[in-house]
Image (cartoon, rainbow, N blue to C red):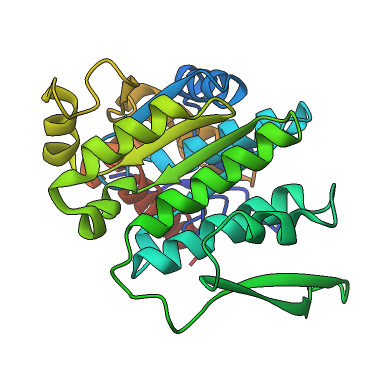
């Protein structure tokens, strides 16, 4: 691979970001996917399932769509279930995310949500946020069993009931939703089907990276998600599109990575967006050394 030409500005920072969701100019254009997901998050009668291999940019695409919908004044919550070790922790994360998004509008939201849940499952704890403002957090009580799967459904039902009472809608993204299968077992598809069909105030976007499991849910006509959700199968970004983005990002910092170099990065790294960005980041660093 030829060595990139350098015209680097002294204060330039590496434009290829890893370690958190891509955003702004750091997000490689998936315009069609973003628009489809955003349209779902706007419409509480819509349900979408986004799936594909890991490190293709599913999470970043969902967060970008959520950002666009929030700019329009509509509330959106995205919860990553990959880091939820148990069902009660997942329920707690959903409650906290919904409260962060809507709690600034209604000070009584936390207590209202708590009143809709089974007695003794959660408690409220007064805290302060990063700016020193008073806030509350939901704490799972010790009496709740770690494998208490129905608690996730109960929390979503409570959110739906509160939205109905306030005549409000909410876009909700559940990233790595298939993790719920660890708590619901083989019953997960049926539980999700019932949940999606009875809620009228929540627009659901489910995202998963276990392709075989997701496709099985979509094929099961009796107890699966067949014809229940709109399906978005995420595929690798075309080489030419990815190469143009890499070249443009590098050029914006004074580093010239022409299309031949950029295409070489894409082909060497393979089809996964995260791997490509990581190699582009290393190439940019190497060009400065």
Which residue is at 39% across, 35% downward? 195
User: Is residue 131 rendered to the left or right of residue 18?
Assistant: right
Q: Is residue 182 visible?
A: yes
Q: Quadrant of residue 145?
A: bottom left
User: Is residue 128 rendered to the left or right of residue 202?
Assistant: right
Q: How many marks?
A: 0
Query: Residue 142: where, in percent of width, then height?
Result: 45, 84
Name the outermost residue toward the front. Answer: 119
Q: Quadrant of residue 222?
A: top left
Residue nearest the observer in this picture, 238 or 23: 23
Residue nearest the observer in this picture, 199 or 247: 199
Query: Residue 220: where, in percent of width, then height?
Result: 11, 25
User: Is residue 82 rendered to the left or right of residue 204?
Assistant: left
Which residue is at 19% across, 36% downward? 214
Residue nearest the observer in this picture, 250 or 184: 184
Q: Is residue 22 visible?
A: no
Name the outermost residue toward the bottom. Answer: 142
* Image height of 179 relative to 35, above or below: below
* Image height of 149 relative to 143, above or below: above
Which residue is at 40% across, 30% downward? 196
Query: Residue 61: where, in percent of width, then height?
Result: 48, 35
* Image height of 213 relative to 153, above or below: above
Query: Residue 205: where, in percent of width, then height?
Result: 45, 33
Quadrant that contains the N terminus = top left
Which residue is at 25% across, 46% downward? 269
């Amino acid at each position: 691979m030829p060595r990139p030409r350098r015209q680097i500005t002294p204060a330039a920072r590496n434009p290829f970001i890893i370690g958190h969701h891509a955003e702004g100019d750091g997000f490689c254009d998936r315009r069609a996917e973003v628009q489809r997901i955003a349209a779902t998050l706007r419409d509480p009668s819509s349900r979408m399932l986004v799936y594909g291999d890991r490190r293709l940019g599913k999470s970043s695409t969902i967060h970008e769509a959520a950002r666009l919908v929030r700019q329009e004044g509509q509330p959106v919550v995205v919860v990553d279930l990959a880091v939820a070790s148990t069902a009660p922790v997942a329920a707690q994360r959903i409650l906290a995310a919904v409260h962060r998004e809507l709690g600034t509008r209604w000070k009584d939201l936390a207590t209202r949500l708590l009143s809709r849940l089974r007695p003794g499952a959660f408690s409220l704890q007064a805290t302060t946020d990063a700016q020193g403002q008073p806030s509350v957090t939901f704490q799972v009580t010790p009496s709740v069993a770690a494998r208490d799967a129905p608690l996730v459904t109960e929390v979503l039902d409570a959110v739906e009931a509160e939205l109905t009472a306030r005549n409000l809608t909410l876009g909700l993204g559940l990233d790595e939703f298939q993790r719920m299968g660890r708590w619901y077992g083989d019953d997960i598809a049926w539980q999700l089907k019932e949940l999606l069909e009875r809620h009228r105030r929540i627009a659901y976007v489910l995202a998963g990276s276990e392709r075989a499991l997701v496709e099985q849910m979509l094929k099961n006509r009796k107890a699966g998600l067949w014809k229940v959700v709109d399906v978005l199968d995420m595929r690798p970004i075309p080489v030419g599109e990815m190469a143009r983005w890499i070249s443009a990002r590098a050029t914006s910092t004074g580093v010239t990575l022409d299309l031949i170099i950029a295409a070489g990065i894409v082909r060497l790294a393979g089809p996964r967006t995260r791997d490509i960005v990581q190699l582009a980041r290393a190439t940019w660093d190497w060009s400065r050394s």
